[in-house]
């Protein structure tokens, strides 16, 4: 039988933070809108902010469905599966928001992710999720699979980009500025980062 949790802490937090991959699910309000399900990977790009709040880094990609859905209605579910060890599935149902680079909270949030350098990945936003319901269930049908390592392809692809070239890349993609259903997605042009990791000019630490 599954169990509900009032807080993300202890063994529950340890389990979540140990998983090399998790999934996010969102949907627009329209009944004929496109449901989106995304895998998230890069080690160090997820963190528990407090017992009721989690966050992950939103990196450069070819779509912005999650961002668009959160901007419209905030609903999101995150899921972790145990592919090794005891069979467990954990879901966090909650309300999320994308915190963009011109938000006063942005740099403080990014500083919470000490296990990854976000610059080579083309950081677009920080997704913050306030948990409304946390529950686990058995993972009896989830297969055993061994984790080998992160792929380095994403960092290699976007490490050579600066804000100007990222803007050009995003502008060419069909579903960045708007979702597949036409909802507002990633604000373009990308606002410059300010604070410790930026100087307000659009260049971030580690970019040339």
Image: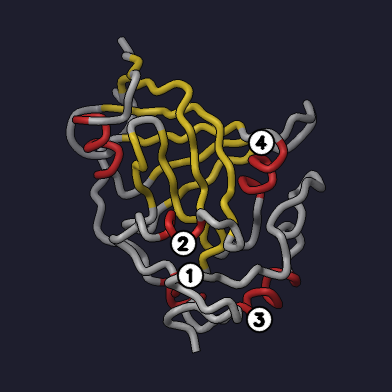
State the SS at label 3. Answer: helix
Disc 4 target residue: 35
The quadrant in which residue 178 appears is bottom right
State the SS at label 4. Answer: loop
Nearest the viewer among 104 and 208 is 104
Q: CA distance from mark 2 to mark 3?
A: 20 Å
Residue 66 located left or right of residue 23: right
Tell me whether the residue at label 2 lies in contact with that at label 4, contact meaning CB atoms closer than 8 angstroms: no
Residue 166 located left or right of residue 206: right
State the SS at label 2. Answer: helix
Q: Which numbered mark, 4 or 1, is in the foreground of this view?
A: 1
The tag on residue 117 is none
Tell me whether the residue at label 1 lies in contact with that at label 3, contact meaning CB atoms closer than 8 angstroms: no
Tell me how many marks there are: 4
The tag on residue 195 is 1
Residue occupying the point 51% across, 84% down:
160
Q: Which callout, 2 or 1, points at the residue further toward the start of the chain?
A: 2
Q: Which numbered mark, 2 or 3, is in the foreground of this view?
A: 2
- Coloring scheme of the render? secondary structure
Residue occupying the point 34% across, 19% down:
6
| Residue 157 image offset from top left, x and y in percent | 50, 76
Q: Which callout, 2 or 4, points at the residue further toward the start of the chain?
A: 4
Q: CA distance from mark 4 to mark 1?
A: 36 Å
Q: Residues within 10 Å of mark 1 (few under 14, many from 20)?
A: few
Quadrant occupied by the N terminus: top left
State the SS at label 1. Answer: loop
Q: Which numbered mark, 2 or 4, is in the foreground of this view?
A: 2
Q: Residues within 10 Å of mark 2 (few under 14, many from 20)?
A: many
Q: CA distance from mark 2 to mark 1?
A: 7 Å
The tag on residue 164 is 3
């Amino acid at each position: 039988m599954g169990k509900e949790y009032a807080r993300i802490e202890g063994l529950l937090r340890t389990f979540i933070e140990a998983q090399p991959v998790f999934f996010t699910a969102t949907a627009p309000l329209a009944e004929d809108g496109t449901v989106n399900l995304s895998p998230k990977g890069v080690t160090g790009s997820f963190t528990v902010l407090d017992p009721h709040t989690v966050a992950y880094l939103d990196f450069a990609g070819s779509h912005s469905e999650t961002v668009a859905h959160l901007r419209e209605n905030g609903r999101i579910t995150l899921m972790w599966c145990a592919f090794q060890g005891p069979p467990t599935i954990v879901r966090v149902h909650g309300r999320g928001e994308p915190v963009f680079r011109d938000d006063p909270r942005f740099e403080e949030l990014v500083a919470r992710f000490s296990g990854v350098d976000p610059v080579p990945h083309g950081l677009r936003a920080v997704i913050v999720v306030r948990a409304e319901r946390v529950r686990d269930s058995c993972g009896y049908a989830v297969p055993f699979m061994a984790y080998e390592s992160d792929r380095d392809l994403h960092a290699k692809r976007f490490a050579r980009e600066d804000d100007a070239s990222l803007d050009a890349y995003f502008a060419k993609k069909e579903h960045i500025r708007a979702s597949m259903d036409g909802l507002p997605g990633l604000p373009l042009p990308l606002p410059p980062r300010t604070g410790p990791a930026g100087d307000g000019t659009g260049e971030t630490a580690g970019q040339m």
